[in-house]
Image (cartoon, grey):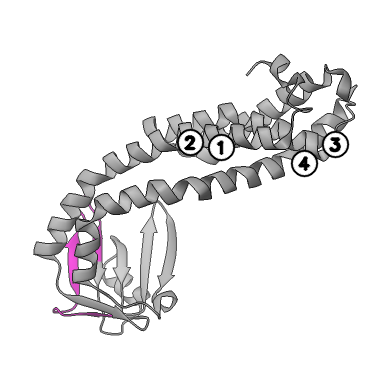
């Protein structure tokens, strides 16, 4: 976006700027959501078949996992790593000692995940109020089409709200840039500039998710481009008499 285009943004109404953001989120997010959905569909169908034919019956209730099979279960992930399921009560550290190449260790209480030198633990206590079975999981995967549609419908307002919050935070940066540029910029003007400054970063973010989903530092790319356009926006707006 050209710096000169920001001359009128700071003096426009906030509602107009918010409508612009809504159109931007709609135009960028729907193609991105559709791409993610299409990309995931084949994998979901394959996973559903694997679960139906290869997974034992299980039940997750009151924060405890019960698997109706001989323990431990060792599953080859196909990439040189293993998934180990052991609900006998052994701690995941003990299981990891026996299976050092395990990427996932599922106990009756937790899931231990180790990838690219990092480790995290998901505790089943968070699901105390949920009862989940193999049949439930298969049902959800079989109805992934409807879940994908709901994801697109309900994903838009959440993404729109998140972008407003991003613009609110970016407006503080715009104020600091404005102080350095000796512009008499108030927060409302900085907020409107930030809403428009999100245009190119958001488009770049959508393209990156579609074309390079494995980008190692997507946040760094997004916020670097956003900062550049905040500077461009403030400099362009200072050329207006309103901010001089």
Q: Element type at marker 2?
A: helix
Taking the spot 56% from the left edge, 35% from the top edge, the residue there is 222
- Note whether residue 79 is visible: no
Question: Which residue occupies the foreground of this view, 179 or 21?
Answer: 21
| Region rendered in magenta | 65-83
Q: Earlier in the sequence, mark 4 or mark 2?
A: 2
Q: Earlier in the sequence, mark 4 or mark 3?
A: 4
Taking the spot 43% from the left edge, 61% from the top edge, the residue there is 119
Per the model, the C-alpha gap separating discs 4 and 3 is 10 Å
Whole-percent x, y for residue 206 in the image: 46, 33
Q: Is residue 135 left or right of residue 193?
A: left
Compared with 182, 102 (above or below) is below
Taking the spot 45% from the left edge, 49% from the top edge, the residue there is 155
Which residue is labeled 1 in the image? 22
Per the model, the C-alpha gap separating discs 4 and 1 is 21 Å
- Given this view, does label 1 or label 3 mark the residue nearer the observer? 1
Per the model, the C-alpha gap separating discs 1 and 2 is 6 Å
Residue 186 image label: 3
Q: Element type at marker 3?
A: loop
Which residue is labeled 2 in the image? 26
Per the model, the C-alpha gap separating discs 2 and 3 is 28 Å
Q: Residues within 10 Å of mark 1 (few under 14, many from 20)?
A: some
Per the model, the C-alpha gap separating discs 1 and 3 is 23 Å
Question: Which residue occupies the foreground of this view, 214 or 172?
Answer: 172
Whole-percent x, y for residue 170 in the image: 70, 39
- Residue 177 position by quadrant: top right
Circles 1, 2 touching at the beta carbon (< 8 Å): yes
Which residue is labeled 4 in the image? 172
Q: Earlier in the sequence, mark 4 or mark 1?
A: 1
Asked if the stretch drawn in magenta spans residue 219, the answer is no
């Amino acid at each position: 976006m050209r710096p000169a285009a920001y001359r009128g943004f700071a003096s426009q109404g906030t509602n107009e700027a918010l409508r612009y953001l809504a159109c931007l989120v709609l135009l960028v997010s729907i193609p991105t959501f559709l791409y993610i959905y299409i990309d995931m569909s084949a994998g979901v169908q394959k996973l559903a078949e694997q679960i139906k034919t290869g997974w034992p019956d299980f039940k997750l209730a009151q924060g405890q996992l019960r698997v109706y099979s001989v323990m431990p279960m060792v599953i080859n992930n196909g990439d040189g790593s293993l998934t180990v399921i052991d609900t006998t009560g052994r701690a995941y550290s003990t299981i990891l000692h026996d299976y050092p190449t395990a990427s996932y260790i599922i106990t009756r209480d937790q899931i231990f995940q180790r990838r690219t030198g990092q480790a995290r633990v998901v505790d089943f206590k968070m699901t105390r109020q949920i009862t989940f079975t193999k049949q439930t999981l298969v049902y959800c995967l079989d109805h992934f089409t409807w879940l994908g549609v709901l994801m697109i419908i309900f994903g838009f307002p959440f993404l729109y709200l998140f972008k407003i919050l991003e613009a609110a935070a970016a407006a503080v940066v715009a104020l600091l840039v404005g102080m350095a540029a000796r512009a008499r910029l108030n927060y409302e003007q900085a907020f409107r500039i930030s809403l428009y400054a999100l245009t190119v970063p958001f488009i770049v973010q959508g393209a990156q998710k579609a074309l390079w989903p494995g980008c190692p530092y997507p946040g760094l790319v997004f916020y670097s481009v956003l900062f550049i356009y905040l500077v461009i926006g403030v400099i362009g707006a200072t050329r207006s008499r309103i901010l001089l």
